[in-house]
Amino acid sequence: MKNLSLRHLRCFVAVAETGSFTQAAARLFQTQSALTATISQFEEAVGMKLFTRNTRRVEMTPDATRFKPIAERLLRDFESAVGDLHAIATGQKGHISVAAVPSVMVLFLMPALAEFRREHPDITVSVRDGGSRQIEQNVLGGEVDFGLCRRTHSYPELDYVPILRDRFGVIYLDDHPLARIKRPLKWTDLAGQDYVALENEVTEDVGPATYPELELTNTLNLRDRASSVTSLYAMLGLGGRLSVLPLLTARAGPLADYNFRILNGPSISRELCLVTRHVRSFSPNTRRILDAVMRSIRIKGCIDGLEVMAADRADGP
C-alpha cells in the first residue's frame, strides 16, 4: 500500500471513465503498456482485481465501482489544495463554494459574505441554498467547500459539527386567537387551530413531518399547504391560520413581519451543523470565509430560542 500514489489513482479513474486502456493511455499521454503496468501494480497492492477485460470493453468490478467516487474526490481535493497554494503564491483570484439552508443563508451567511468581500475583493464566491439532504450531497460530491444544514443521513465520509440549535414555535397574525394568550404558549394551545404546512424539498427541515414527536397531525386542522416561505407568508396573510416553524425560518425574510412565539411543553429544537468532508483540509480562503460566518453567528446569535453551539470547534483547523 505504501507504494501507491496519485499516479495510480489517475490511471484508475481514466480507465474507469473511458472503459478502454487505449483511450485512457491517450488521455494521460502514456503508452498503453505503461498504463497497464500501473493498473497491475494498483491491483497487486490492494489485493483484488479492479477491471475485467473482454474483446469489446474494460469494465469495473463491483469493488472498483464503489471505489471510483472516492478516488475522484481524492483527486479533486488534491488538485484544489494545490490550486489554492498556487493562487496564494502568485496572487491569483480564488473561488469558494458554500451551501446553506435558506434561513442560515439570509441571517448569517450573507452578512458574513459582505464582510468577506470588503476584505478580499478578488475572491469569488458561489452560494447554494437548499434542503439538508441536497446540501449533504453537495458536500459529499465535492461541489461545495462546506455546508450549513441539518444532519440527515450521517454519512461516514462527512464531519458534522453542531453550531446552532433553534427552537420551534408558532407564527400567526396579530388578530389570531393565540395573540390573546399572554402566558408562554404550549403545544396544547394549538389544538383545533387551522394550520398551513410548509412542504417541499428545500423546506423539509422545518416541517413537522420531520419531527414526529410534535404529534401535530393529531391536534391541528391541516387546511392549506405552502411550497415556499413566500407562499406561506401569503397564506398566513389571509388570516385565521397559523404555522409551526423553527425560529430562524420565522425570522428570515418576509415572515419576520408576523408574530412568532416559542412553544413549550416540550421544548423542540432543530440542530444545524457545519458539514465538511473529513478527507479534506480547508484552504486558506475557505477558512477566512468560515471565520466570518462564525463571527456573524456570534454577533447575531443572542436571540431567545437560539443556542450557539461549539463555535470553537468550527473555528479549529
Image (cartoon, rainbow, N blue to C red):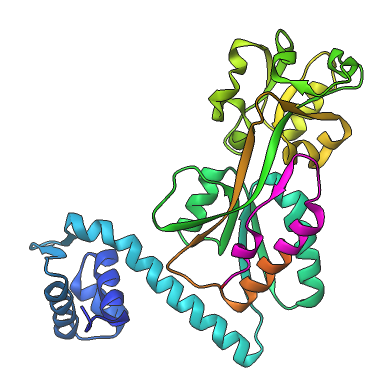
In this image, 32 relative to 269: left or right?
A: left
Q: Position of residue 290 (x, y in %)?
A: 66, 66
Q: Residue at x 81, y 34 (%)?
A: 255
Q: Which residues are magenta?
A: 294-316
Q: Indicate whether residue 300 is drawn in magenta.
A: yes
As drawn, the residue found furthest toward the bottom would be 90
Q: Position of residue 177 (x, y in %)?
A: 86, 12
Q: Residue at x 72, y 57 (%)?
A: 109
**In the picture shown, does residue 248 fall above or below 239?**
below
| Residue placed most toward the observer, 90 or 307 | 307
Marker count (numbered): 0
Q: Residue at x 77, y 51 (%)?
A: 301
In this image, 285 relative to 49: left or right?
A: right
**In the picture shown, does residue 140 fall above or below 283?**
above
Q: Indicate whether residue 16 is drawn in magenta.
A: no
Q: Position of residue 8 (x, y in %)?
A: 25, 78
> Image quarter for residue 247?
top right
Q: Assign the N terminus to one quadrant of the image.
A: bottom left
In this image, 173 relative to 295: left or right?
A: right
Q: Position of residue 140 (x, y in %)?
A: 45, 57
